[in-house]
Image (cartoon, rainbow, N blue to C red):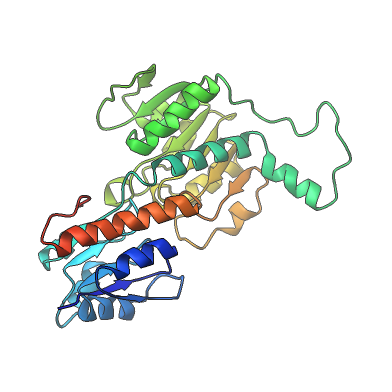
Amino acid sequence: MTKKIFISRPLPKAVLSAAALLGDITVREDTSAMTEDEMVASLVNYDVVLPTLGDIYSEKIFKSCKRINVKLLANFGVGFNHIDVKAANEYGITVSNTPGAVTDATADIAIALMLMCCRRTSEGERIVRSNKWEGWHPTQMLGFHISNKKVGIVGMGNIGQAIARRCHFGFGMQVGYFSRSPKNLDYPVDRYGSLTELASNSDILVISVPGGSATHHLINKDIFSAMQPHSYFVNIARGDVVKEIDLIEALRLNQIAGAGLDVYENEPKVPKDLISMENVVLLPHLGTASLEVRTGMGLMAVENIKYFLEGKEPPNLV
């Protein structure tokens, strides 16, 4: 019997073509997150669902179903904190994700944010576009030079290590990190015993940890208070890792010099306080936003589906 596969958002053509070879696919054309009713319907009416960020498959959703036909949630993305994996497993549903494909692209965005906020590039572009630039002069828009500075990385998984390599080899930065386990790397790094110690010793603090209950509001007023007034904060992880009101207060009190953000606590809502600040760079969750990377993520999700339908364990089982 042909399997029914539900894809929750439009994906690159190559991904949809590959998925179509595995079964009867239905692509939801809406680019916003699924509603609760849509998620319930997906679990009832399909064999496999390919969801992504924003599709909140909580225990409540599973309980709302009179019956569940879905056997695999093949998540599009490395992060899967929007899926209650424990509840899914209890209902006989396997969950997979797409690690690896996102590593370099996300690390690149971290470096972009570092440069943008430290060198004030967004602020400068706004001046040019508003026709307020009066010409070059020696003290115009002086920013913070990142070469040979200290970068602190919170979370030293694949993405954290990719950021660290770029910082060390590209900018000669001194790399410090905070992680659950020590890492054996081929360049010098310093592991700090506490997050506050790392924060107090970093010129730029970059967040690269998974989302979920274990890291919810990991970054709060205690961390911002430990940072130096000239230091910058960058988040390319998950929005709820940061207590946003504490970040806003730290910026307002000049406890830190600025911030670069690709993710937000209540996406896609961004606080007006952040929008109004000139020393904050705001990106619309661009971490993996390139055709090559999104195609790679999608094909990895499709491969997980293929293995599952063949009765094998998905390569990227959560």
94 left or right, relative to 242: left
- Vertical side of 177 occupied by 101: above or below: below
Q: Quadrant of residue 40?
A: bottom left
**Residue nearest the viewer, comparing 43 with 143:** 43
Q: Quadrant of residue 100?
A: top left
| Location of residue 14 in the rendering, given as x and y in whole percent from the top left corner | 40, 61
257 left or right, relative to 318: right
**Residue drawn where x is 39% and y is 48% of the image:** 241
- Vertical side of 193 occupied by 99: above or below: below
**Residue drawn where x is 52% and y is 25% of the image:** 170
**Residue nearest the viewer, comparing 225 with 214:** 214
270 left or right, relative to 101: right
Q: Quadrant of the N terminus?
A: bottom left
The answer, for residue 236, to whether it is visible in the render is yes
**Residue nearest the viewer, comparing 43 with 196:** 43
The answer, for residue 84, to whether it is visible in the render is no
**Residue nearest the viewer, comparing 295 with 233:** 295
**Residue drawn where x is 27% and y is 47% of the image:** 214
| Location of residue 277 in the rendering, given as x and y in whole percent from the top left corner | 65, 48
**Residue drawn where x is 41% and y is 33% of the image:** 162
> How many marks on residues?
0
- Vertical side of 163 occupied by 317: above or below: below
